[in-house]
Image (cartoon, rainbow, N blue to C red):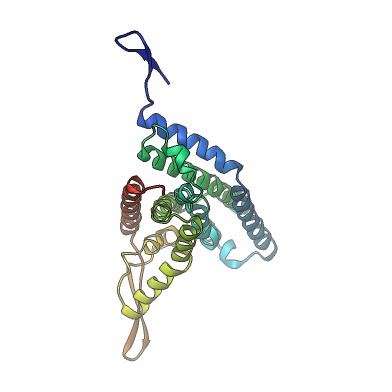
Amino acid sequence: MATNQDQRGRMVRNLPGSLSQVKTIAKYEFINYLRTRRFFILLSITVAISILLTSVVAYYRPAGFMSSELGFYSSWWGLAVNYILILSAIFFGGDAISGEFQNKTGYFLIGNPISRTAIYAGKWIAALLASLTVFAVFTAFTIANGFYYFGINVPWQFGLSFLFSILYLVSIMGFTFFFSSIFKSSSMSILVTAILFLFAFNLIQTLVSNLVQMEPWFLITYGAQIIGNILNDPYPQNIVEIQIGPNRTFTSYNATVPEGIAIMAIYFAVTMILGLYIFKRKELT
């Protein structure tokens, strides 16, 4: 922290700028995440899933995995990546803000001359970095197995799917921080986020698509379909109609790549703005 002299010659400390505050908070919050039990639990789950997939593919050689490079990455990636992303956001973002209210630790942090925007942004960046660390481990297992079976020829579609996965993680993290700002109970914010992403959104998407016969463009999970769909060749059509009877058709919907990117980006922007607004106005009592 820099110091200057005032007009009377006294030494006056200059407060760090907002970016410096964000960087400092993100650094120490990230270090704290790496030391927590939840980080090692989620890392262990990710490694266990990766080892299980490695063993099953090596022993059974499923046709879907062994048909082609694209088929391998599509099958492997599609089985677990969404769950790992969702669990990462829940583990690291679910109580990032609500925990400060529940445990009253926010008194020590907010009592300092630090803007709430810097606190919110720093915590969000730290949670994202911790999640990306776990995600990188699963990605490394995926690519290592792909190299073993098909050499270094990684399909370009996998690169796009990887980027879409990061965008989905970013949008989920914004969503979890939004709910973490609403509740003062860590367990409540984690529970609501888990129910929404693991069950509710998927159920609503199924009901809207199959019963209402309407494109569920307003759901983040619908936009996230591009993570798996980009690994299909050709890419699925936006609207697919299947004749299931003489007078009845079944319609399914697939988000286009621009649509999926837009949905996830909008979810991130809206939830981050709302979450920060709530956090800045919320009292610790």
50 and 43: which is toward the camera: 43
In the rendered view, would you say 168 is above or below 239? Answer: above
Q: Quadrant of the N terminus?
A: top left
- Residue at 43% over, 51% down: 173
Please say if 139 is above or below 198: above
Residue 10: image x %, image y %?
A: 37, 11
**Residue 273 drawn above or below residue 246:** above
Would residue 52 be found to the left or right of residue 64 on screen? right
Count of numbered badges drawn on the protein:
0
Farthest-out residue, front: 285
The part of the image, by quadrant, that contains residue 4 is: top left
Q: Residue at x 42, y 62 (%)?
A: 229
Residue closest to the far right: 59
- Work out whether residue 93 or residue 265 is closer to the camera in this orientation and state it: 93
Whether residue 161 sits left or right of residue 277 in the image: it is right
Task: From the top left corner, tell me how far across and down residue 224 is, in percent.
Answer: 40, 60
Point out residue 90 in the picture as x, y percentages from the top left corner.
50, 55
Q: In the current view of this chain or complex, which residue is farthest to the top?
A: 9
On screen, 22 above or below 255? above
